[in-house]
Image (spheres, helix red, strand yellow):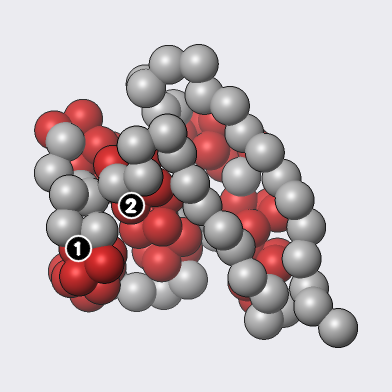
Amino acid sequence: MRNEAKVSYIYLTKQLQHAEIKKHFWGHESSILNNQGAVAVHCKGGSGRTGLVIALLLLQLGYNKSEVVEMVQAIRPKALVNPSQKAFFERFQPIA
């Protein structure tokens, strides 16, 4: 049996806030991933925000930042290059 859930988020601005992500995101996706489920992530453009969210999930799962950048950019080369998204990624600390 597949472990899946559909959770949709609409960010009206490109200004991601750590508190918003913590409040609305990690509970669902972390529990799905910890139970061997899958998470699909997409955004309108498909590179910047998608890559950022995937990178944050990987950090949350215990990968270090250099590993995450390498893995994400291997699949999405334009990910983690936008200055505000890159800064958000660099400041991010996994949520306990």
How many numbered marks, from 0 up? 2
Q: Which residue is mark 1?
A: 73
Q: Residue at x 70, y 54 (%)?
A: 28
Inspect the image, locate mark 2, and give the three-letter code of the amino acid beneath it: Gly
Of residues 52 and 91, the one nearer the viewer is: 52
Inspect the image, locate mark 1, and give the three-letter code of the amino acid beneath it: Gln
Which quadrant of the view contains residue 73?
bottom left
Q: Looking at this view, name the residue that lies furthest to the top.
A: 12
Give how far across and how far down residue 38 sits, in percent: 63, 70
Give how far across and how far down residue 77 sits, in percent: 16, 57
Query: Looking at the figure, which quarter contains the C terminus?
Result: bottom right
Q: Which residue is mark 2?
A: 51
Of residues 93 and 88, the one nearer the viewer is: 88
Residue 92 visible to the viewer: no
For residue 69, side relative to residue 14 (left or right): left
Helix, strand or loop status at disc 2: helix
- The answer to whether the residue labelled 2 contacts the one labelled 1, judged by CB atoms less than 8 Å apart, is yes
